[in-house]
């Protein structure tokens, strides 16, 4: 079949952009077609996403940092995760941190420009005594640093969600990870519906929802689009996009990495599907984007993690801050309002 003429490629991107700029959602077929066309030439899609980001998100870049307050011995079998007890990754298990250590890390995050600080625990669900500790951490971080507190602590029910919200957790992270169709290929110890139930519990308790996924785990472009639509339907305020950093000892240790321009095309597609949401580049961006990291904002991102991740190291936060300022963007720091609603340009 002959290649589609360049003018038609641009016509599709231009048509989708016009509607996205008006806040009109794009459909599944269009999103899949955009990724297909981007395989040949990603720039019309990337430049379209930049226009939509500037329209709805302006020049501000939201920065957040996370702390692994409990590491390892997870009973779940997510095939990419180094913390799963099912695999043999070289991760040293560690029980809950002391609150004083967590506050110290939060202060460092604030100094590095973060406005939000995430408390991340391994495991399927918090035990009652763990919940009490995480509540204490959340209160201490909020009162002593002024940072917004986020949490990612496994499955939620109504009671657990309400207790975290009462402790000052503003936003809860619970990723859908991939499409409903692909999920059973990468995790068998819980279901997609389980993940959606936790997302609904977070929202019902009055917390904002941070919900995205991970790419490079064997999914197709259709799976990537279906994830974007599922996240939109779930009501996510913030959408973190992670890209596989293969860890030795996990089933995906030999996975072939996505090409940088493919990653940027995925980011751009998410921006067009979710024009007014915070799109955050998270795990694996340094390893996978390399010298093209600056283009994540051109492709539609308006947020990123700064500092280290859970079991892998990030790059120096000062480098990210310099990059953002060199691009003429404005980092949102502690004390600034952090909103997941449209801000205009």
Image (spheres, rainbow, N blue to C red):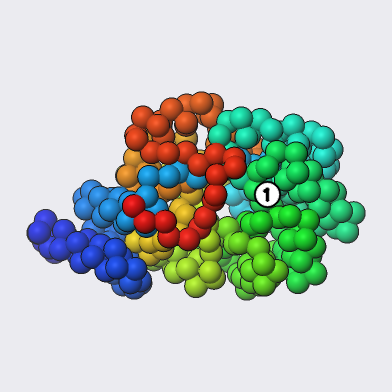
Residue at the location (42% across, 56% down)?
Answer: 343
Residue at disc 1, secondary structure: strand
- Quadrant where the N terminus sits is bottom left
- The answer to whether 110 is drawn above or below residue 226 in the figure is above
Q: Is residue 218 left or right of residue 47?
A: right
Percent from the top left, x then y, of residue 190?
68, 66
Residue at which label 1 appears: 149
Q: Which residue corresponds to the image point at 48% horizontal and 49% vertical from the top-left?
A: 280
Where residue 299 appears, x then y in whole percent? 34, 48
Question: Which residue occupies the foreground of this view, 86 or 235?
Answer: 235
Residue at image position (21%, 53%) is 44
**Would residue 57 be visible to someone looking at this image?**
yes
Query: 169 or 315: which is nearer to us?
Result: 169
Residue 104: x, y in percent? 74, 32
Judge from the rendering whether residue 36 lies leftward or rightward of residue 230; answer left or right: left
Image height of 251 relative to 91, above or below? below
């Amino acid at each position: 079949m002959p290649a589609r003429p360049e003018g038609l490629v641009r016509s599709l991107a231009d048509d989708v952009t016009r509607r996205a700029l008006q806040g009109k959602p794009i459909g599944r077929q269009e999103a899949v077609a955009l990724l297909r066309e981007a395989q040949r030439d990603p720039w019309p899609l990337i430049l379209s996403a930049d226009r939509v980001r500037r329209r709805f998100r302006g020049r501000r870049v939201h920065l957040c940092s996370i702390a692994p307050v409990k590491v390892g011995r997870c009973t779940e079998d997510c095939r990419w995760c180094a913390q799963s007890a099912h695999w043999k990754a070289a991760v040293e298990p560690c029980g809950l941190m002391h609150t004083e250590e967590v506050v110290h890390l939060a202060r460092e995050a604030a100094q590095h420009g973060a406005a939000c600080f995430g408390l991340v625990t391994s495991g399927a669900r918090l035990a009652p005594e763990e919940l009490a500790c995480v509540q204490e951490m959340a209160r201490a971080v909020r009162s002593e640093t002024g940072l917004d507190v986020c949490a990612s602590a496994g499955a939620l029910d109504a009671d657990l969600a309400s207790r975290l919200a009462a402790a000052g957790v503003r936003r809860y992270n619970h990723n859908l990870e991939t499409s409903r169709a692909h999920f059973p290929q990468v995790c068998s110890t819980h279901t997609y519906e389980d993940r959606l139930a936790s997302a609904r519990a977070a929202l019902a308790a009055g917390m904002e929802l941070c919900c995205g996924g991970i790419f490079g785990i064997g999914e197709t472009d259709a799976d990537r689009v279906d994830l974007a639509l599922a996240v939109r339907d779930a009501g996510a305020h913030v959408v973190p996009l992670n890209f596989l950093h293969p860890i030795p000892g996990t089933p995906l240790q030999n996975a072939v990495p996505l090409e940088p321009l493919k990653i940027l095309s995925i980011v751009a597609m998410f921006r067009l599907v979710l024009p007014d949401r915070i799109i955050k580049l998270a795990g694996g961006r340094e390893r996978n984007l390399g010298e093209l990291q600056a283009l994540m904002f051109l492709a539609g991102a308006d947020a990123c993690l700064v500092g280290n991740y859970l079991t892998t190291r990030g790059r120096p936060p000062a480098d990210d801050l310099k990059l953002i300022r060199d691009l003429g963007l404005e980092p949102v720091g502690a004390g600034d309002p952090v909103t997941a609603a449209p801000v205009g340009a």
